[in-house]
Image (spheres, helix red, strand yellow):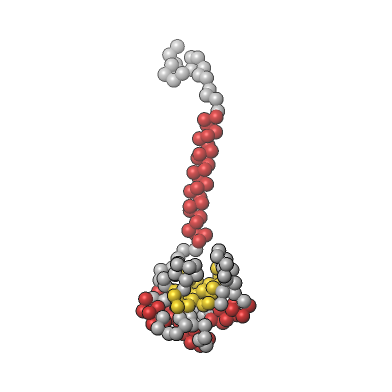
């Protein structure tokens, strides 16, 4: 792989990933850097990176999975491991991989749900738009010429005359 490029899955890799993705009401499949990922309540628990399939596990699960030949920490960028993810051994049959995918899903469902990005970003955008509007109004006020005061109509002199 060339530096700065992401591996691309083949149609067979995508089919294998889709076959492992649990049929669960809280599970969604999303594209991720030209690959695919499985999410449960906003938490990624399964990812396809080229032909590698990685699962997210608690510490005990990671320790156990890493004892199997072919399993390895998930390092999508050299020197930057995703600490909770382990790549499933490529030689494993689908039924054995499915056991670990189910454990990964259970772990993801035990984590707090992440808010949807749109819901999280909306208040920030609204605040930014409001701040820009206030800034524009202040700039417009500064560019307007000051009104000259009319003689005899200043405050405090009404009715004294």
Figure quadrant of the N terminus: bottom right
Q: From this view, report whether residue 93 is shown above or below residue 80.
A: below
Image spot of residue 154 (x, y percent): 46, 18
Residue 41 visible: no
Image spot of residue 19 (x, y percent): 56, 82
Residue most extreme to the front: 2
Which of the 4 image quarters holds residue 6? bottom right
- The residue depicted at 50 percent of the width and 45 percent of the height is 130
- The residue depicted at 50 percent of the width and 35 percent of the height is 138
Residue most extreme to the right: 11
Figure quadrant of the C terminus: top left
Image spot of residue 18 (x, y percent): 57, 79
Q: How many labels does the image show?
A: 0
Residue most extreme to the left: 60
Image spot of residue 147 (x, y percent): 53, 22
Residue most extreme to the top: 161
Which of the 4 image quarters holds residue 145? top right
Residue 75 visible: yes
- The residue depicted at 40 percent of the width and 74 percent of the height is 110
Residue situated in front as seen by the camera: 32 or 102: 32
Q: From this view, report whether residue 111 is shown above or below residue 144.
A: below
- The residue depicted at 52 percent of the width and 30 percent of the height is 142
């Amino acid at each position: 792989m060339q530096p700065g490029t992401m591996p691309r899955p083949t149609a067979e890799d995508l089919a294998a990933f889709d076959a492992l993705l649990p049929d669960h009401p809280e599970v969604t499949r999303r594209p991720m850097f030209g690959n695919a990922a499985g999410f449960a309540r906003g938490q990624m628990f399964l990812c396809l990176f080229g032909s590698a399939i990685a699962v997210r596990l608690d510490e005990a699960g990671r320790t156990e999975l890493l004892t199997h030949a072919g399993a390895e920490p998930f390092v999508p960028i050299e020197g930057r491991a995703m600490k909770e993810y382990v790549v499933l051994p490529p030689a494993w049959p689908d039924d054995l991989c499915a056991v670990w995918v189910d454990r990964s899903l259970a772990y993801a469902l035990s984590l707090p749900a992440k808010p949807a990005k749109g819901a999280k970003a909306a208040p920030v955008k609204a605040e930014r738009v409001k701040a820009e509007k206030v800034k524009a109004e202040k700039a417009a006020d500064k560019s307007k010429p000051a009104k000259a005061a009319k003689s005899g109509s200043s405050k405090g002199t009404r009715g004294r005359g």
